[in-house]
Amino acid sequence: MKNINPQELESALARLPRLPYDEWLRVVSGIANHFGEEQAREILRHGGFHDERRNETEYKIRKRLRGITIGTVIHILRQYGIEFRLLSSEYSSEVRGQSFGCLPAMHSNSHEYLPQSLREPCIHKFYDEEAEERVSFYQYQAGCNRYDAERKVVQEFSNVDAERLYRCAVNTNANNKNVLCSYGNFLDSFQQTALRFEQLKDVIKQGFTIAPFLFLERKNQANWLGAELVFIDVDSGLNVYDAIQMDATQQCLFLYTSPSHTEEQHRYRVVFALSSFERSINAYRRILEKFIELYKADSSCSDPAKHYFGNTNAIFWQPKEGFVA
């Protein structure tokens, strides 16, 4: 494993949410095993982690799991959408915003020169923990992009299973449609990540906000980097029961009711996953417009940088399963 800048690691740790105990123990163990106990204390302190109980981190350092490597730490960071390599000062700010980026970031005024569509493969999470750590190893040490690293792991591990991840940004500073801070701070607090199917639904169920795309620094059209999710907001026209009979809806990930939904006035969103990650904002906008026309949806959905509030009371519908909890 090549040399790691402690300051870069501190910056990455500062972006992690509160971790479950087992993950926090592995992070502490991996850092202490790589840097030694004294430097690990400084990294963890500057990374913003504070003991819930007195001397808890010190106890974890002394009693750490000896088989845990720094590759495990990088793997955990990536689980939460934090691409460690891209936090390095040797990378430009243009690239730093791409949690899972593999192509150079594109300025907004370059979109007119893009081909009709600029697609990248999907990314996945391997169920086998060793296989997933191996992906992180290939990305960090060998400098592979995520796609090449996944291909190497598939060749190396026989019959390995994986689940697709959906790249997006999540904002926890809202409860349903209620923004819990100033709107400027709200726009600055979207965290880019990659979610499994059930995690995507859970974010909505918790009332959090989703921006179904990746971006550079601040969420807006000028900083748009790419998308693989499509959210279609239907506020009038088709009711839910008519919508679920449509052939297109049978291909969606799921449908869910929005916060303003009532039995008298059906308001809902249909969520689709593209077969690839679309880097062309013009191609993505055309996809949105086709779905808007099909569902007679809210025309504001044509904004590629639009975000969507969650709903703690949402009713979900999924193809082949119907209405689900």
Image (cartoon, helix red, strand yellow):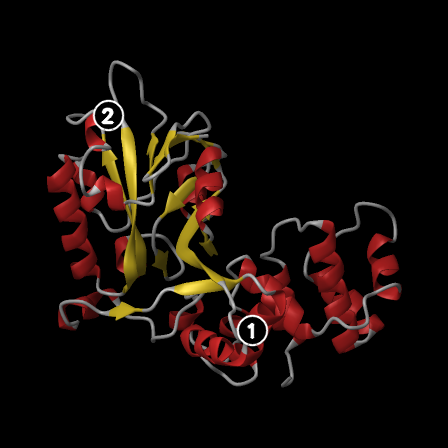
Residue 198, position in %: x, y? 47, 45
Report the label total: 2
Camera-nearest residue between 107 and 286: 286
* CB-based contact (under 8 Å), mark 2 and mark 1: no
Q: Is residue 298 left or right of residue 40?
A: left
Residue 156, position in %: x, y? 53, 80
Q: Examine the image and state in which quarter residue 317 appears.
A: top left
Pointer 2: residues within 10 angstroms few (<14), some, or many (20+)?
A: few
Q: Residue at x 87, y 48 (%)?
A: 54
Q: Is residue 185 above or below residue 47?
A: above
Q: Amino acid under label 1?
A: Ser
What SS does tag 1 mark? Answer: helix
Marks 2 and 1, the one that precedes in the sequence: 1
Camera-nearest residue between 26 and 55: 26
Camera-nearest residue between 303 and 275: 275
Q: Is residue 199 above or below residue 120?
A: above
Q: Is residue 46 left or right of residue 56?
A: left
- Provide the residue designation for mark 2: 241
Q: Examine the image and state in which quarter residue 45 appears.
A: bottom right
Q: Residue at x 40, y 55 (%)?
A: 166
Pointer 1: residues within 10 angstroms few (<14), some, or many (20+)?
A: many
Q: Amino acid under label 2?
A: Tyr
Decide if residue 34 is in sight here: yes
Q: Is residue 109 left or right of residue 206?
A: left
Give the mark toward the camera: 2 or 1.
2
Residue 185, position in %: x, y? 45, 43
- Provide the residue designation for mark 1: 136
